[in-house]
Image: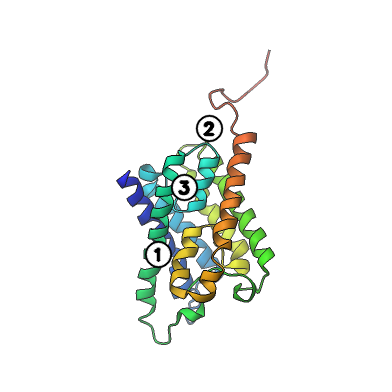
């Protein structure tokens, strides 16, 4: 269990450092900024690389919503949900702390610029409302878990889950960065919010509640509609 929790901590640290780090350090860097496309890829790549590196140890959740969704889908024991979430949040805060140390070495740096925190209303990149942010976070997390559950199904092609999951997270960011800066991950949201404080902490509730609601719904829906009898081979050819 210690190895699993350590893997979740390190993987979540990597996700926040890589994803949020790309937004804070590189998104608008003079003349060679990576922009929204680059930030989206960075988040996807952190999950993809983390999944292959640490997935064999912990399952590579790196996200409290994923842990809850896998539990709801019957793929993860309830007794380990709490410890996994704690490890993920600690990793998220540590990742944001490392990013803060790096970013604060630049002249004019200020967490008041956002520090890749998630927000709605005046703190949304596109000034989207709380309702828009809530719907976006629920739906994007729902679809993220559908991809995860499908890509890790016993009938899915072996060895490709990390690729599908990383690309799904990239797509999610391409869609929703303008709405909330994209969370779909309470630990990712908590890390930057701790350093921004103020509005980021006051709005953090949405980025816990909505991703977890979306993930739990996906788990129950997938388990009810698609899990089926995993022992029965798929039907092929004509039946006689």
Q: How many marks?
A: 3
Q: Which residue is mark 3?
A: 162
Crowdedness near tag 2: few (<14), some (14–19) or many (≥20) residues, C-alpha within 10 Å = few
Q: Which residue is mark 2?
A: 155
Q: Which residue is mark 1?
A: 93
Q: Earlier in the sequence, mark 2 or mark 3?
A: 2
Q: In the rendering, at what x and y percent does residue 76 appear?
A: 47, 39
Which label lies toward us, 1 or 3? 1
Q: Is residue 88 left or right of residue 169?
A: left
Q: Earlier in the sequence, mark 1 or mark 3?
A: 1
Q: In the rendering, at what x and y percent does residue 97 appear?
A: 37, 69
Q: Earlier in the sequence, mark 1 or mark 2?
A: 1
Crowdedness near tag 3: few (<14), some (14–19) or many (≥20) residues, C-alpha within 10 Å = many
Q: In the rendering, at what x and y percent does residue 103 appear?
A: 39, 77
Residues at marks 1 and 2, CA–CA distance in whole angstroms: 36 Å
Could you tell me which residue is drawn at 60 percent across and 45 percent down? 218
């Amino acid at each position: 269990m210690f190895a699993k929790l350590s893997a979740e901590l390190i993987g979540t640290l990597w996700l926040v450092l890589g994803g949020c780090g790309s937004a804070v350090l590189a998104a608008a860097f003079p003349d060679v900024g990576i922009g929204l496309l680059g930030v989206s890829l960075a988040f996807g790549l952190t999950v993809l690389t983390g999944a292959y590196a640490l997935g064999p140890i912990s399952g590579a959740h790196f996200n409290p919503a994923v842990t809850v969704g896998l539990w709801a889908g019957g793929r993860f024991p309830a007794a380990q949900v709490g410890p996994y979430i704690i490890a993920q949040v600690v990793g998220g805060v540590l990742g944001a702390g490392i990013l803060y140390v790096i970013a604060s070495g630049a002249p004019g740096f200020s967490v008041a610029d956002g520090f890749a925190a998630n927000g709605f209303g005046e703190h949304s990149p596109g000034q989207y409302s709380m309702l828009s942010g809530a719907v976006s976070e629920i739906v994007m997390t729902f679809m993220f878990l559908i991809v995860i559950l499908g890509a890790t199904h016993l009938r899915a092609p072996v060895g490709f889950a990390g690729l599908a999951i990383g690309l799904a997270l990239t797509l999610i960011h391409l869609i929703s960065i303008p709405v909330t800066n994209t969370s779909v991950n309470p630990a990712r949201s908590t890390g930057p919010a701790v350093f921004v404080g103020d509005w980021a902490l006051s709005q953090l509730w949405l980025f816990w509640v909505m991703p977890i609601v979306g993930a739990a719904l996906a788990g129950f829906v997938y388990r009810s509609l698609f899990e089926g009898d995993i022992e029965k081979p798929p039907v092929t050819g004509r039946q006689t």
